[in-house]
Amino acid sequence: MSPAPEGSASRSTALHTDRYELTMLDAALRDGTAGRRCVFELFGRRLPGGRRFGVVAGTGRLLDLIRDFRFGDDELRFLRDERMVDASTLAFLEEYRFTGSIAGYREGELYFPGSPILTIEGTFAEAVVLETLGLSVLNHDSAIATAAARMSIAAGDRPLAEMGSRRAGEHSAVAAARAAYIAGFGATSNLEAGRTWGIPTMGTAAHAWTLLHDTEEEAFRAQIDALGVGTTLLVDTYDTARGVETAIRVAGTELGGVRIDSGDLPIVAAQVRAQLDELGATGTRITVTSDLDEFAIAALAASPVDSYGVGTSLVTGSGSPTAGMVYKLVARQDATGGWVAVEKASVDKSSKGGRKAAFRTLDEGTATSELIAVSDGFEELETAVTHPDARALQVPLVAEGEPDAAYLGREGVAAARQHHARVLEELPVRALALSRSDPAIPTVYIEAV
């Protein structure tokens, strides 16, 4: 039996993890370190693909999945049969519940190298096993959201629709539609994304519809009979100019729109617009949907295009299919109960130890830096009061194992979309360029006061 889709009945996510999480847990239970309080941090060392900013996405999904991170009979039987852990570890897992806390950046927020996107606090045993799940969700969804944000910038005020389901795994397709919607897309072709997350859905007909009928005219007449003259007709199955002529002859000058899915789009769009206007269909909109990415969309800025449909490039991160985030232990209690900051020193893979408070400094509403206050002594973290010219970036997401309902479900998606639109306005102008470059603002570390 295949797993239940997101948004349906609860299902275990406990085996959505790497084996070494459980072997570490098994060993920690043996040597007595499993109960040590720890602080893990999820962050990105750099922005992939020379991007100038990143967009946090997947947080609400992750909180749901953590709530379902339970080892039921089937999961325990698999571990027992494969002899992955011993009997005492199986007993621990049978009762496993995450009871710690998670703070982090709101979904839809922008992030930069070193941003403490999630801070997970709990015992080593309950926090270490969440590594793979957290990275799986945020690396995928944030990559899609970042690509979507760049496409939204390139599109300006023109609407964007997500149409990439057939280019992704069935569950990834739903997650991609969700991430794209948070970062500025207005609709999706995916019905499960509409049902689960409340995203507006769209879609009319493919080339198969035209090919099904004896003539293009018959296909157009049947579609208009079913959907009305406000529909969008796909005009390039055979000859685009002839298709436009047929569309207006059949539907009249009140036809809602035409879609172009092939050809040199700037040239074809100009030709179609001129033909529509000559036929009196001055209000008929033009949608283009042919292998678009942010660069192709930007190249169409001066063309008479009214909206875009984006598929493959979007759901694969437009060249950067993962956000490259990592999950590292940054602080732990020692044998006496005192807190110790820990960090990885590997070449090109270092981490910054200590708990952190993150702020975005602003100058007249424009972001100037990602300010991260690092606490080695684990006194109370700094707040916005300490930095009056900055915006605090972290919010409580999970307290004593319970996720904040404000970040879950359809309401959480709507809130993330609104938050993203607000914070995008803080970016300096140089951040809006699509070319490869350094991050739009620097990350600055300071010692907590």
Image (tube, rainbow, N blue to C red):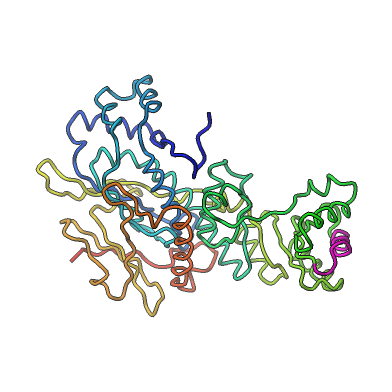
Quadrant assignment for the C terminus: bottom left
Q: Is residue 343 left or right of residue 141?
A: left
Q: Is residue 423 left or right of residue 217?
A: left
Tally the numbered discs: 0
Q: Which residue lies most toward the bottom here?
A: 364
Q: Nearer the viewer, residue 328 or 337?
A: 337
Q: Residue extending furthest left? A: 336
Q: Seen in the image, is 406 located left or right of residue 435?
A: left
Q: Which residue corresponds to the image point at 71% horizontal and 70% vertical from the top-left? A: 303
Q: Write the residue at 16% across / 45% down.
A: 333
Query: Residue 375 appears at what percent x and percent y?
Result: 20, 58
Q: Is residue 91 above or below residue 399?
A: above
Q: Residue 162: percent from the left, percent from the top?
A: 61, 55
Q: Which residues are magenta?
A: 241-254
Q: Main secondary structure of the magenta part?
A: helix
- Residue pictured at 79% horizontal, 46% vertical: 208
Whether 343 is drawn above or below 279: the answer is above
Q: Who's the residue at 83% across and 53% down the image?
A: 222
Residue 246 located within the stretch drawn in magenta: yes
- Asked if residue 8 is among those painted magenta in the image, a careful observer would answer no
Q: Residue 228: where, in percent of width, then height?
A: 78, 60
Q: Is residue 413 above or below residue 36?
A: below
Q: Indicate the position of residue 173 as horizontal and vertical percent values.
A: 56, 46
